[in-house]
Amino acid sequence: MKEKISIHSFSNYFILLIMVFLIPMQEWPDNNEYWNINQIYSNALAAVIYIYGITPPSFESSLNHSFFSDSFMFLSQWSDHLINLSKLILIIPSLYILNILSTSVVNRPLPFAPPFIFSILSVSLEPIAIILITASYLLLLSRRIMLALFIAFIATLIDRSMAGTLSGIIIYAAYIQFRIKLRYIFLIIFIFILLALSPSIIFFENTFYDILNFYGISKQEIVYNNQFGKNNILALIASLSGLYGWMSIRPTPWILYYTVIILLFIFGFIKADHEKKIEFLFFLIPTLAVLYILPPLSQARYFPILTLLYWETLLTGAKYLFGRVDILVFSVIGMTSIGLLLAHFK
């Protein structure tokens, strides 16, 4: 089946190119670390730029701080954007395949979601994990449950940050397979959380930490984050809505942008059908649990399915209010482009 070209598909490809040309390669979070460690994906990109004689990236911070107090911009040069272009060798075929899979399952490609596109443009193994877990989610919707769970688990082995999304897929798979009543699902989740947080139940506590240790998360990290970590739900909302890079590049005018996006999401959630609300909650609950355990994980890239559902919901709100989504989509592209241009040339 060929990919169905729609406003969503076209706009995702379009904003992909905008990000490649307007966001410096260094502005993807943790790219400095990923570029300098021995990973297959970053090594492959390094080999490409070596073959074509492209200047390797530097990671020098500029002195220009933006509105957000903890942000900064990296100095960049044209060769850094050429490195971005080389990412398309992986990303465009992957996005095309995901759109084909989505079209075959739900009769439409992936929803327009700029934070999702930003997430798959990192130079780490994270994009590969995101692509796999997105495929897993689509397979789950097609009722290929065991294959979906297997691929989602593989995604967590590639990048442990997908573990929260795996939890959502497991919960949703149980709901699909057994049609367990919602009150029982939420009761099980509530009991699980209470047991996991209760130091008095040693067996369950040890099992909980054994699972986390499998992904390299120690008890000491969790205890430290519970003592000193801050609630980052607002940061997650901003990231889901389209706050990119090192908190320094954002859509313009950003106050209007975030107000519109968040209000449309709220309205879309109210108007969404029952099943879509359930689906969103099944992926939101594990996300909130992850934020409680490890507050620093407050970026949309760690929760790709939640990101897609968030944007699908706000687009539902836009369609209900305006009768169409193209005005909103092109407005988001325009506001994002202006924000990136201002950040790039400041």
Image (cartoon, helix red, strand yellow):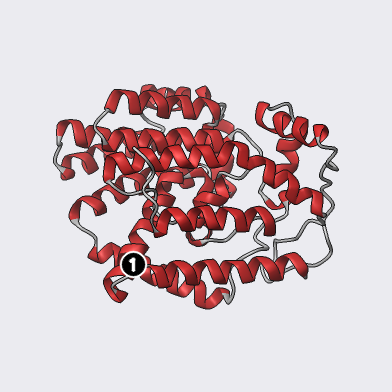
Give the residue at mark 1: 266
Q: Is residue 273 above or below residue 301?
A: below
Q: Position of residue 340 (x, y in %)?
A: 66, 65
Q: Could you say which quadrant of the image residue 312 lies in?
A: bottom left
Q: Could you say which quadrant of the image residue 23 lies in?
A: bottom right
Q: Position of residue 114 (x, y in %)?
A: 51, 56
Q: Quadrant of the N terminus?
A: top left
Q: Residue at x 29, y 34 (%)?
A: 140
**Residue 178 as seen in the image, left or right of residue 172:** left
**Residue 294 as seen in the image, left or right of residue 6:** right
Residue 8 visible within the image: yes
Q: Position of residue 324 (x, y in %)?
A: 32, 70
**Disc count in the image?**
1
Q: Is residue 209 above or below residue 236?
A: above
Q: Residue at x 85, y 38 (%)?
A: 53
Q: Secondary structure at mark 1?
A: helix
- The residue at the far front in this view is 2
Q: Position of residue 65 (x, y in %)?
A: 76, 67
Q: Could you say which quadrant of the image residue 19 lies in?
A: bottom right
Q: Identify which residue, 6 or 278, lies in the foreground.
A: 6
Q: Quadrant of the C terminus?
A: bottom right
Residue 162 visible within the image: no
Q: Residue at x 24, y 32 (%)?
A: 143
**Residue 287 as seen in the image, left or right of residue 340:** left
Q: Identify which residue, 233 or 84, lies in the foreground.
A: 84
Q: Residue at x 31, y 50 (%)?
A: 280
The amino acid beneath tag 1 is Ile
Mark 1 nearby-residue class (10 Å; few <14, some 14–19, many ≥20): some
